Image (cartoon, rainbow, N blue to C red):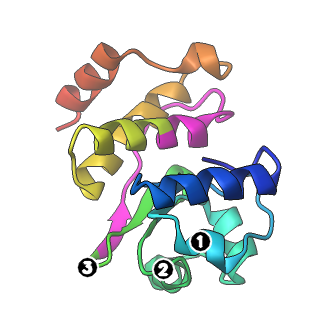
Amino acid sequence: TQLETNISSIDRAVRLAYEKGVKVILNPAPVQPVKDVLLSMVDLVTPNEVEAEIMTGIPVSDKAAADQAAKWFMDRGVITLGSRGVYIHDGIKSGILPAYRVKALDTTGAGDAFNGGLLTALSEGKDLWEAAVFANALAALSVQKLGTTVSMPLRKEIDAFLAEHK
């Protein structure tokens, strides 16, 4: 889920999912205050670096700062870092997965593309690191086109991109 709808609806949906044992990923955009009880029912938080800083008060300028922000987000999380890549903390290990070097035409929707790719890969049984590689590829492809919906690549395009960039 994300924070574009009213927080009481999000709270209800997350609570229902939690009670049924359904995993929840929260993309805290647009950023706004989120109660600790809501965060406690979330399995993974995926802010960008600006959202992470606003929510935690920690400027995410390097891996050490991202580690601190991830600890604030329950010792697990993904922080997208734009052209620097994505910070990942799976509760055991952490690191920065570099971004693919592409010519970006329009970054609008890149976070949504990343989150869609992350969710897809996790639902296919990939671990968080493998899922982030897939999501990074999807986002890299999406920023090379103008627009949002029309810039989302097909699965065969993502698979071809990953094969080319091994």
Where residue 140 sits, quadrant-wise, is top left
* In the image: residue 149, left or right of residue 97: right
* In the image: residue 14, left or right of residue 158: right
User: Local crowd at mark 3 within 10 Å, few (<14), some, or many (≥20)?
Assistant: few
Q: CA distance from mark 2 to mark 1?
A: 8 Å
**Residue 69 falls inside the magenta stretch:** no
Numbered label attached to residue 92: 3
Q: Position of residue 26 (x, y in %)?
A: 57, 56
User: Local crowd at mark 2 within 10 Å, few (<14), some, or many (≥20)?
Assistant: some
Q: Secondary structure at mark 2?
A: loop
Q: Amino acid at mark 3?
A: Ile
Q: Residue at x 83, y 49 (%)?
A: 6
> Is residue 140 depicted above or below 61 in this figure?
above
Where residue 20 sits, quadrant-wise, is bottom left
**Residue 112 falls inside the magenta stretch:** yes
The quadrant of the image that shows the C terminus is top left
Q: CA distance from mark 1 to mark 3?
A: 19 Å
- Highlighted range, magenta: 94-115
Q: Residue at x 23, y 54 (%)?
A: 127
Q: Position of residue 37 (x, y in %)?
A: 64, 76
Q: Amino acid at mark 2?
A: Met
Q: Amino acid at mark 1?
A: Leu
> Is residue 79 depicted above or below 152 in this figure?
below
Contact, mark 2 vs mark 1 (Cβ under 8 Å): yes
Q: Earlier in the sequence, mark 2 or mark 1?
A: 1
Q: Secondary structure at mark 1?
A: helix
Q: Nearer the viewer, mark 3 or mark 2?
A: 2
Q: Secondary structure at mark 3?
A: loop
Q: Which residue is mark 2?
A: 74
Numbered label attached to residue 39: 1
93 or 33: nearer the viewer: 33
